[in-house]
Each structure stands twice: as C-alpha cells, then as structure tokens.
Image (cartoon, rainbow, N blue to C red):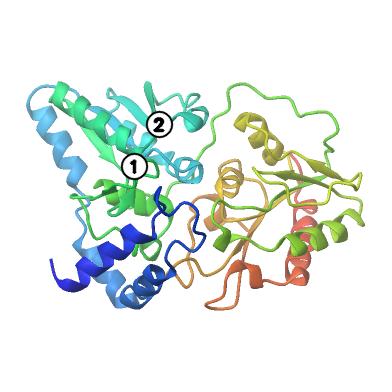
Amino acid sequence: MNLRRHIIRLAENISRKTYFLDGLKTRLGISRFILKILVPPVSANDRLKILSSLDKDYITRKIQRVIQCGHIPSFWILLTHSMGDIVACEPIVRYLKQLVPDAKIGWIVRRPFRELLEFNPNINSIITVENLAEGKDRVAMLAAESPNVIIVDCHFDGTSCSATNKIFRNTANPNVNIHTYYSIGSLLETYSLAAGLPPLTDAPTFHFGGNPAIPSGISKRRIVFHCHASERCRDWTDEKWNQLASKLTETGRQIVEVGTKRVLNCRQNSIFDFTGYQDLQTIACIIRDADVFVGIDSVFAHVANAVKTPSIVLLGKYRNFESYFPYTGAFAHSESFQVIHAPKGQPAAEIKVETVFAAIQKMLSLTASVPTA
C-alpha cells in the first residue's frame, strides 16, 4: 500500500465519530481537508476505468458452483443501513429470485429497518442486528454453516460501523468505495456492483402490509415535505422551508411534514406535523396519496420514488461529488419528477425558494391535467 493510501485511510479513521471525539463538532477538520485534497471528484475517464475493472459475475459464478454440486443456492443479502439505501435496493431481491426461482432469500438488516422488508413476498427470512459489525459476523457464521449459502454483501469498500468505528473492506469489488460510489451511478447500481452483481436499474417497490389508515386531520389535497436529512450537508435551510410552506398554504394546500426533526412552524392550521412518527407503513401511505412530495435526498425521497408520487427533490454537492443522481425507476424516467440542482459545486442550501415554488406549481398543474383511471 502506497503512502497516499495510508494517509487517506488514516484521515478516514480520524473523520469518523469516536468516543474520544464525541464532544467535538468538527471532529478534527484537518482530516476532511486531507480527504478533499487527496480524493478529488472522479473524472469521466476514471469512471470508465472503474466500471471496466468491476467483476459483475462474482455472484453468478457462486451460483453456478452451488448448482453444479447438486444444491439450490440460499441467498443472504447484507445491507444493514440506511433506510433509503434499503428501499432503493429492493430490486436486488427480485433479481436473485429471477436467477434462481427456487432459492430462499434472506436479508440482514438493523432492527429499526425491519419494517421495510417484512412484507416483501420474495424475502423468506430476516435477521435483525444492532450494527454492521454484528451483521458481518452473522454472514460469516451463515456461510460457514452451509456450502449452499451465498452472501450478497452490498456494502462498498470503506464502509464503517457506526457502533464500533471499524472500517470494512470489500474484496469483490474494492473500486466501489466511499470516494467513488456516487460517480458510478444510482444507489441501486452502486450497491449491486459492490456485491458482484450487474448494475441493476429496475424501479424499487414499496411493499405494504395491508392499507394503513391516514390519520385524521390530514387533507386529501396535501403536499408532503421532508426537510431534514441525517447529514446536514444535504439539507436546505429551515428559513427557506418555512418561506416555501407559507407560499403554498396561501394557495389552499395543506403541508404535511415527515421526518425525525420538525422544521416547519406548525402554528398555522394548514401545516400538519407528522415528524417523529415511527410507523413507516403509514408514512409511506401518506406520501403515496399526496399531490406532491418535496424533499432533500433522504429515505422519504426513495419511498416517494417507490410509490410513484409526483416529486421534487433538492440536490447539491455532497462530499467529493459535485453532482449525483441516486435514483432509478419513476424518478429516472417519469415527467412527474424533477430534481433541482444547486449551482455547480454548491450545497442544496443554495437553491432559491422561488425556484422550488415555481417547480411545485408546475408539477401541480401537470398532475392535475393527467386523467384519472
């Protein structure tokens, strides 16, 4: 390993949250400076080199070996987090089922995200874990128990465990890593390639367990906002969200805010606070039947994509990625979706309120002109 690689790995370790650094907001900003200098955006030529170097038949060869021994493969998908990634990668289950229709398919996931998987008819088993490190241990045990087990590890190279701070390597396709993954394609393409599958581009599906009831007080003529991401660099500003909400409520629309943190001023009757709600099925139903979903890049944007809700998503620079597009399916092909990009090299926070408001008005007029079945 050359010196540059050593320095990058050291900076990665320092920039991750540790017990010793919990109280420091910057968590040694010099490490991020080092990463910015040593890990520039991936160029078009570098992207082509990465794509040509990837082993897209890694899982296929494992399947062939199991079948040649007279057995039926049993798949275990390892993708423990985050919620948006899990929703985006739902097509991997269908792809494996198409490859081996008689195969049993399991998924190892963090406990809070089980609800995203338990109603999928193609998933036979779910193992819940507390963190990625425990998930890695479980797949190692499963693989040791039976030669029929095929591990589909979707975590790309350099993924860290938030509980143990351990960084895990990906030996199948190490060139899909924390510095290149958004340059390769959508999240589904990236995670499938990391696992040793072809770059999948199918639309995700959100599986409902019945038809959850919409809570009383939520209007049929609603726009759903998701204002706050798990990483602040993806966020718009609280002031801009409230300005946008005021403009929309003046037109007679109700705003329903979802997520973990409330951003909107809920003293207005036309704003319904649904933040902090834990039932993902109900939230997905609220998004599915909305006139428009508006949000930053987050799990609920992926849910809106999976339930095919007309949507507007705000994207800007993220880490060393000047621009990126994480979605497949309806968001990639439908006219009822618009991504609003910040000026080149700027975060999503730089997008103007007037730009988003105009896009919503256009989206509402577009969806109103579509005849209902």
Q: Going 82% across and 56% down the picture, which residue do you hit?
A: 245
In the shown orientation, is residue 171 left or right of residue 103?
left
SS for tag 2? loop
Count of labels shown?
A: 2
Q: Going 73% across and 25% down the picture, which residue do you hit?
A: 213
Q: Residues within 10 Å of mark 1 (few under 14, many from 20)?
A: some
Image quarter (top left, top right, bottom left or bottom right) of the N terminus: bottom left
Gap in Å between the C-alphas at discs 1 and 2?
A: 11 Å
Of 298 and 53, which appears nearest the observer?
Answer: 298
Q: Is residue 243 above or below residue 90?
A: below
Does the image show residue 73?
Answer: no
In the shown orientation, is residue 119 left or right of residue 42?
right
Q: Residue 348's spot in the image, x, y percent?
A: 61, 67
Q: Going 70% across and 40% down the picture, which residue do you hit?
A: 275
Question: Residue 243 lies in what quarter of the image?
Answer: bottom right
Q: Is residue 337 above or below residue 146?
A: below
Q: Which residue is mark 2?
A: 130
Q: Amino acid at mark 2?
A: Glu
Q: Residue 217's spot in the image, x, y percent?
A: 86, 33
Q: Which residue is mark 1?
A: 164
Does the image show residue 185?
Answer: yes
**Of pointers 1 and 2, the one earlier in the residue sequence:** 2
Of 131 and 278, which appears nearest the observer?
Answer: 131
